[in-house]
């Protein structure tokens, strides 16, 4: 499984446009084959910092996602939306399990 965690600092003046694109990106990405989970949320400490949490079955699913029209549209718009450099981390995961709290 491939897991991505990304943090995108959004320009406050572009926040509404960014959220519209992100809403569409999330909705379409969740329907992709090989997608386990795809979510975005505003950080509780900074509402202009949007965090993505993505889980893919494998490398093929990850690569397929990066070639979709909705991802390309979001990626093309990023330079106009960002207030600073995004941070993206990729994790290769052998297993995952629920944790009881």
Image: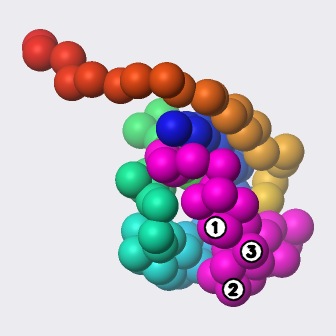
Q: Is residue 76 left or right of residue 94?
A: right
Q: Nearer the viewer, residue 59 or 98?
A: 59
Please indicate, yes or no, whether residue 27 appears anywhere in the rendered image. Answer: yes
In the picture, the disc for residue 65 is 1
| Residue at position x 54%, y 74% in the image | 25
Q: Is residue 96 magenta?
A: no
- Residue at label 2? 69
| Residue at position x 67%, y 79% in the image | 68
SS type, badge 1: helix
Label 2–label 1 contact, CB within 8 A: no
In the picture, the disc for residue 67 is 3
Local packing at callout 2 (Cα closer than 10 Å; few below 14, some 14-19, many 20+) is: few
Local packing at callout 3 (Cα closer than 10 Å; few below 14, some 14-19, many 20+) is: few
Q: Nearer the viewer, residue 73 or 7?
A: 73
In the picture, the disc for residue 41 is none
| Residue at position x 68%, y 34% in the image | 90
Query: Number of marks in the image?
Result: 3
Please report the bounds of the magenta region as a residue range: 54-81
């Amino acid at each position: 499984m491939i897991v991505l965690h990304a943090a995108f600092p959004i320009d406050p003046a572009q926040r509404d446009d960014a959220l519209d694109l992100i809403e569409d990106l999330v909705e379409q990405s969740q329907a992709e084959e090989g997608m386990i989970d795809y979510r975005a949320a505003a950080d509780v400490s900074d509402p202009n910092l949007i965090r993505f949490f993505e889980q893919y079955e494998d490398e093929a699913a990850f690569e397929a996602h990066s070639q979709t029209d909705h991802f390309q549209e979001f990626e093309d718009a990023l330079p106009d939306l960002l207030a600073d450099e995004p941070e993206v981390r990729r994790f290769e995961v052998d297993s995952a399990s629920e944790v009881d709290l």
